[in-house]
């Protein structure tokens, strides 16, 4: 019996101290999946399925649009979306554009002010007008 209690639930041959693979950018996981399984279903949402190829294509298209708006390295983009395919596409699009994702839960909307959401995205304090209008600060 192991002195590490959690090891009792591991399948045979699995060690808790196994070396980790080298780190990779999160967006490369979608690229790898689309190359390895292009026609395999990645998402199934209300009888609409998306393959890994489709998902990567949608994210890449959205990434180009985000870059045209100024999203790139060092830019924080707030996502205030429910758990839908839109969130997954937007999440990978921001990363592909070079930005950083800041998640906001739609369930927290009544408790979190627009001003604090904008501050989390931009790292700067938004003006009262920006907070009132719900506009984020994309450029520094």
Image (cartoon, rainbow, N blue to C red):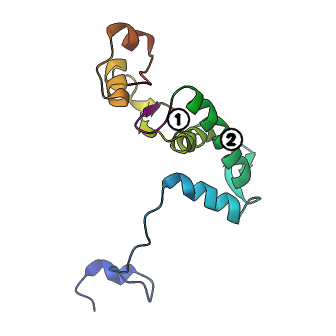
Q: In which quarter of the image is residue 19?
A: bottom left
Q: Is residue 18 left or right of residue 42?
A: left
Q: In this view, does 135 lie to the left or right of 87?
A: left
Q: Is residue 9 left or right of residue 59?
A: left
What residue sits right under mark 2 in the picture?
A: 58
Which residue reaches farthest right?
Answer: 39
What residue sits right under mark 1 in the picture?
A: 82
Closest to the camera, between mark 2 and mark 1, is 2
Going from the N terminus, do you reach mark 2 or mark 1 first? 2
Query: Relative to 122, is 56 above or below?
Result: below
Q: In this view, does 98 lie to the left or right of 8?
A: right
Q: In which quarter of the image is residue 117?
A: top left
Query: Relative to 86, is 33 above or below?
Result: below
Q: In which quarter of the image is residue 8?
A: bottom left
Q: Residue at x 57, y 38 (%)?
A: 90
Q: Residue 95 carries which label?
A: none
Residue bounds of the magenta highlight: 71-79
Q: Is residue 4 magenta?
A: no
């Amino acid at each position: 019996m192991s002195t590490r209690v959690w090891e009792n639930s591991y399948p045979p041959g699995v060690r808790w101290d196994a070396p980790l693979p080298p780190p990779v950018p999160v967006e490369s996981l979608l690229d790898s999946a689309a190359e390895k399984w292009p026609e395999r279903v990645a998402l199934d949402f209300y009888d609409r399925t998306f393959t890994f190829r489709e998902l990567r294509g949608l994210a890449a298209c959205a990434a180009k649009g985000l870059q045209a708006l100024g999203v790139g390295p060092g830019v924080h983009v707030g996502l205030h979306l429910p758990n839908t395919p839109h969130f997954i596409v937007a999440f990978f699009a921001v990363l592909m554009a070079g930005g950083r994702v800041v998640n906001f839960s739609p369930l927290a909307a009544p408790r979190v002010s627009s001003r604090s959401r904008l501050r989390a995205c931009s790292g700067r304090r938004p003006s009262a007008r920006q907070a009132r209008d719900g506009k984020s600060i994309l450029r520094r």
